[in-house]
Each structure stands twice: as C-alpha cells, then as structure tokens.
Image (spheres, helix red, strand yellow):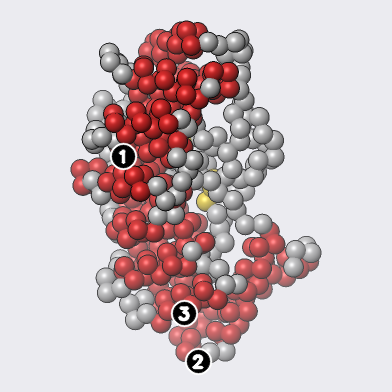
C-alpha cells in the first residue's frame, strides 16, 4: 500500500480511517504506513508543502485498497540481502556507479556538496527522492571505507557554522531499509546520515545541538533516531526515554501533529516503553482527522500482542471513561491481539470481558474479531516486525476455537451467542484448512 498521506477532506478521511481499522480487525495483512503526510493525491513530482511544518489532517486515503499479502520474496531494489523476512531491514548495497570509487575525506565532502547542489536544483520530487537514495548509498560506502566516526565528523561539520537548509517539499517517510525514503529538508537528510553512522560523535552532536531545545518535530524525530542507533538500540536508555516523552507530551506538537510526530510513535514500540502506554491511550481518544488515533492503535496492538500487561493498561486507563463507538472498537481490537495459547493473556481477556465498562456492543465486536492475528507491515523509523509463522497462527486460531466452544456452552455468554457462533464457524473453517495443509 502507498504511504498514508493527507487529504483535507475530514468527512471522507474519517470514514476511511474507520474502514482501515475495520479491515485490520477482520484479519487481513495490510502493506501500509501510519504517517499522515500531506500529499496522497500529489505525486512526488507535484507535491507541495508550505515552508512551516504541516499539521496532519488525516491518515488514511479514501481509496484505501483491499490489502494483500506483503509478498516479500526479494528485498527492495538496491538492497543486498535476499530472502529478508517481512519487517527486517535489508543491508544497503554499499556502492553504486556514482559512489563506487575510493573515497577520502575530501572526496566525501565533494560528493556531498555535489548532491546538495543537485537537490537544490532538482526539478521535481521524484528526482529529489532518487538523490536522497543516492545520498544514503554514499554514506554507506563512506562508512565502509573511512569508518563511522570519520563520516560522522564530516556530517557534523556540514551541520555546523554556516549551515543553510533546503526545503525539499517532500514528506517525512521512513523506508523499509532503515533509511529515510523521503525527508522534508537537507538538515533531516544529514541527520539521517548521522543515524547511519551509529557513532558517538553523532550522538554527542544531537544531544547538544538538536535535542537541546524543541524546534521542529522532524528535527526531534531525526535526533531520536540518531541517539537510538548510536546507543545500539538500547531499550533502557534513560536519556532517550526522557526525550521521547518530551516529544510526545509537547502540547504545541500534539495539538497539531505532523507526519514526523506520528512516525515517532514507532519509538514507543521499538523501546517497548510501557511508561508511554497511557500517552498512547490518550492519543487513541484524539480527533480522528489528526491521525493520532490510528497511529496509537497500531502501536498498542503491536505491543499488546507480545505483552498482555499493555492491553491490561489500556483497559485500566479507559475504565470509567465513556468511549465513543470507534474508540471502543479500537480497544476491543487491542485486546483481541492477545494470544489464546497463553494463560497470562487469557487472564487479561477474562478481566476485560468482566469489566462493566465494556458495553454489549464492544464485547460483541471483540468476540467477532478475536483472535486478531493480522499484521500490518509498515516501514518504521526504528522498530522491525516479524509476523508469526503459519504454524503459530494456526495454533492461536485452534486455541481460540476451543475457547469459543467453551463460551458457547457457558450461560454467562448467552447474550453474545450470535457472535460466538459466528466465530466458531469462522475459526472451524480456518483450523480445518490448516489441518488439511498439514500445518496442524
């Protein structure tokens, strides 16, 4: 699926958001992206954005296609690793004809300057996107030849005194290879190069000159990426945790969220930062057209599927709150991500269904989608995704079927009999198909 970018049509966007969540809840595997960039209809050649950071008006295009299987048989063009599993980051090819020659510090600086001039004069967005890719390949080659610290020092020099930015008029969009596919400006591109070095030199620069004060969400997101990579993707880095929380609790940014802010929700997943789950719940209850409810729902689903305490926190944080119908469905879908083969997960499900704050409609919805085994594959700024194997999926569905058969005989579930019978039929079909295929 194409990146989820923005249309300024709130009614259509709201309907499309609801459709996207419903499609995900029905168990499809979608190739999608949660960002709320501004130019869904505009191609990269014609996309225009204002000089100031754009707020996100929505996150799902109205022509949301029927999702299909990712089909990750080969890595993306320009990647060296073949057979990379979905969500894993392929290894960038270290050289192209433009950068295959031997580099030294002077020639690296000259190559970067050449790319800067080309980006400054590029006629359209597609040309800028190609140059952004070439920059990433140049940095990868230079790291291999000169070392990460030397490349970081050159990029820091370019970001220092006399720096002049270039507005690319492109969205903030991660790629599937760990690099940014598009960035809004030259500063973000140089910071992405710094992130690729994973160098202490890069981290020191970012701490003192990027994350020292809030400027733009793109700066902050790229600064976090640099620190994340330089720390070796260390989950318990207190500095990183504090700066991520600072970003997600900045009222100026959260009241008018940008694509960079929404993409930064992924750091919560990558870090598995349970302290920020209540913040994600608040975003879940935000304005639909801001894009935050959809982004937060994806974060919470991914975290809950591996950790039942996340789903328990979502339920606890919303207890006693009058949820509208769509937020209630999102909560139900998050709980439905829990694993019916695990007793710890089942305990959270039992508590959820016994919660008096869960309406009959919400319980009915949950019963019709559980177990929620879909995976939404996204190009992420920090996290990677490894979908369950067919065998694991089949075991979850088999366990779910046994649970529904027990509920069908339980008088306490008499009012949900229709939803339970529907799910028994649904899961019986998929379990029998798995048996015929020799998966079970």
- Which one is earlier in the sequence, the residue at label 1 or at label 2? 1
Q: Which residue is mark 3?
A: 350
Position of residue 352 measured from the top left corner of the image (x, y, whole percent):
42, 76
Name the side, left or right, on which 347 lies relative to 5.
right
Q: In terms of depth relative to the viewer, which is nearer, 191 or 70?
A: 191
- Residue 98 at x, y percent in the picture: 57, 12
Q: Residue furthest bottom?
A: 411
Which residue is identified by label 2?
A: 411
Query: Secondary structure beneath disc 3?
Result: helix
Give the number of callouts: 3
The residue located at (33%, 42%) in the rendering is 261
Crowding at dot 2, Cα within 10 Å, few <14 / some 14-19 / many 20+, comes out as few
Where is residue 251 drawn, in percent x and y? 21, 47
Q: Please tell me whether mark 3 or mark 2 is closer to you in this view.
A: 3
Would you name the residue on which mark 1 appears?
258
Residue beneath the point at 29% across and 35% down: 211
Comparing 174 with 430, the one in front is 174
**1 or 3: tag closer to the N-terminus:** 1
Q: Position of residue 140 (x, y in %)?
A: 55, 24
Name the residue rendered at 46%, 74% in the picture. Answer: 348
Tell me which corner region of the image, top left, top right, bottom left or bottom right, holds residue 77: top right
Secondary element type, mark 2: helix
Query: Do tag 3 and tag 2 residues touch (Cβ < 8 Å)?
Result: no
The label on residue 65 is none
Label 1 residue SS: loop
Residue 392's place in the image compared with 405, above or below, is: above
Q: Point out the image quarter for the C terminus.
A: bottom right
């Amino acid at each position: 699926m194409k990146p989820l970018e923005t249309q300024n049509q709130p009614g259509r966007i709201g309907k499309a958001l609801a459709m996207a969540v419903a499609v995900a809840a029905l168990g499809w595997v979608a190739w999608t992206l949660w960002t709320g960039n501004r130019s869904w209809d505009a191609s990269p050649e014609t996309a225009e954005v204002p000089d100031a950071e754009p707020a996100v008006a929505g996150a799902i295009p109205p022509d949301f296609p029927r999702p299909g299987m990712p089909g990750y048989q080969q890595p993306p063009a320009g990647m060296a690793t073949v057979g990379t599993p979905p969500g894993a980051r392929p290894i960038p090819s270290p050289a192209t004809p433009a950068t295959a020659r031997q580099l030294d510090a002077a020639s690296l600086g000259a190559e970067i300057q050449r790319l800067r001039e080309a980006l400054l004069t590029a006629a359209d967005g597609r040309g800028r996107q190609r140059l952004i890719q070439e920059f990433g390949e140049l940095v990868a080659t230079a790291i291999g030849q000169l070392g990460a610290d030397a490349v970081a020092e050159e990029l820091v020099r370019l970001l220092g005194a006399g720096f002049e930015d270039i507005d690319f008029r492109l969205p903030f969009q991660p790629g599937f290879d760990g690099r940014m596919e598009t960035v809004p400006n030259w500063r973000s591109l140089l910071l992405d190069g710094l992130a690729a070095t994973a160098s202490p030199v890069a981290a020191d620069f970012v701490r003192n000159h990027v994350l020292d004060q809030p400027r733009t969400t793109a700066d902050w997101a790229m600064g976090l990426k640099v620190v994340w990579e330089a720390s070796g993707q260390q989950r318990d880095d207190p500095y990183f945790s504090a700066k991520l929380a600072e970003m997600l609790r900045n009222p100026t940014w959260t009241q008018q969220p940008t694509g960079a802010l929404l993409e930064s929700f992924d750091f919560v997943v990558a870090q598995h930062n349970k302290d920020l789950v209540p913040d994600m719940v608040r975003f879940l209850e935000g304005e639909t057209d801001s894009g935050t409810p959809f982004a937060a729902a994806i974060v919470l689903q991914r975290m809950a599927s591996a950790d039942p305490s996340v789903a328990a926190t979502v339920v606890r944080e919303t207890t006693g709150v009058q949820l509208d119908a769509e937020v209630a469905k999102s909560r139900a879908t998050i709980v439905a991500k829990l694993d019916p083969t695990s007793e710890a997960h089942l305990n959270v499900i039992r508590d959820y269904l016994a919660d008096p704050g869960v309406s009959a409609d919400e319980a009915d919805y949950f019963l019709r989608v559980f177990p929620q085994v879909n995976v939404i594959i996204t190009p992420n700024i920090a996290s990677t995704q490894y979908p369950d194997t067919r065998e694991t999926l089949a075991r979850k569905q088999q366990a779910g079927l046994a649970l529904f058969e027990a509920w069908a005989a339980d008088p306490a579930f008499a009012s949900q009999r229709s939803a339970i019978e529907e799910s028994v039929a649904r899961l019986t079909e998929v379990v029998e198909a798995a048996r015929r295929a020799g998966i079970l």
